[in-house]
Image (cartoon, rainbow, N blue to C red):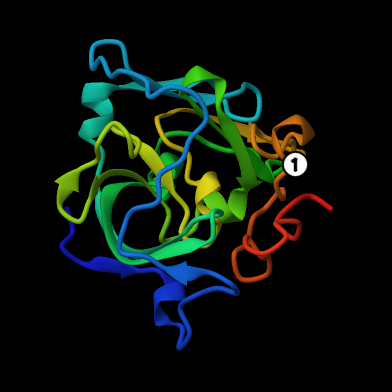
Amino acid sequence: MNDKVILSTDTQRSQRLPPNQTLTQAWPTSHAGEIPPFDGNKWDLSLFPYPLIPEVKSFNWLQFQALPRVKVFADLHSVIGVSKLDNLWEGVPTRELWNHVRIKPSVQFVMVHGEYGFCTNMPIDDFFGEDCLFAMKHNGEDLTLEQGFPVRLVVPRLFDWKSAKWVRGIEFMEHDQPGFWEESQNGGFHMRGDPWTLDAHGDGQRYRKK
């Protein structure tokens, strides 16, 4: 692994707290449903669908662990209204997928799938940001099950519900579709979730779709 640490651009801002966020030293934890168990003999990560990529691609746990890793220094902004600064993540950069699949130019979005049917959508440019990774460590320690072990996505530029825990699949899409929290019956959260333009505090409406 390259010892160079990638600095998320938000950590270079003169004001690092987005509007109406409060600084916290704790790690905000929230998720829908139960915490899934981990079995390294059954775990895999799949990339799909054909024909947006030439063929469905899967990594088992040993293969995924062997992929190149990076370290990323980034802030974490939770939709519950708190931000945790100065996080050092370690894991596989999302850009590593370019070395394993050819993605059609018509792909503009991804849906990230986690355990138990959870999913969240985002523009492909956000997903492939330089500071985005499939994290396996946080501040030098393995992730806990509660925080997404074995693999959680980290997209520092977006609210943390986009940084899906327990990732199992990446679906490439030509058109945007709502994920779990973006569905109206689950809260109708904003389709992108930029903490610098959306307010996750107060009346709670600005981070919703409308």
Total marks placed: 1
Residue 112's image quarter? Answer: top right
Place of residue 200 in the rendered image (x, y in percent of width and height, measured from the top left): 63, 60
Residue ID for mark 1: 188
Q: Quadrant of residue 6?
A: bottom left
Which three-letter amino acid code belongs to the residue tagged 1?
Answer: Gly
Vertical order, 28 against 18 (above or below): above
**Residue 3 to residue 127: above or below:** below
Extreme-front residue of the structure: 202
Q: Which residue does the image show at 25% across and 26% down from the upper left?
A: 63
Position of 2 compared to 6: left or right?
left
Looking at the picture, how far across and down is residue 91, in whole percent? 28, 46
**Left or right: 179 with respect to 148?**
right
Viewer-closest of 9 and 149? 149
In the rendered image, the vertical position of residue 79 relative to residue 73, given as above or below: above
Residue 120 in picture, x, y percent from top left = 60, 37
Q: As rendered, which of 196 and 50 lies closer to the eye?
A: 196
Rendering coords of residue 49 (x, y %): 61, 23
Residue 194 placement, left or right of 21:
right
Q: Residue furthest bottom?
A: 14
Q: Residue furthest top?
A: 42
The residue lying at 24 percent from left, 36 percent from top is 144
Q: Secondary structure at mark 1?
A: loop
Q: Residues within 10 Å of mark 1 (few under 14, many from 20)?
A: some
Q: Residue at x 32, y 34 (%)?
A: 146
Residue at the spot 40% in from the left edge and 44% down from the top edge: 29
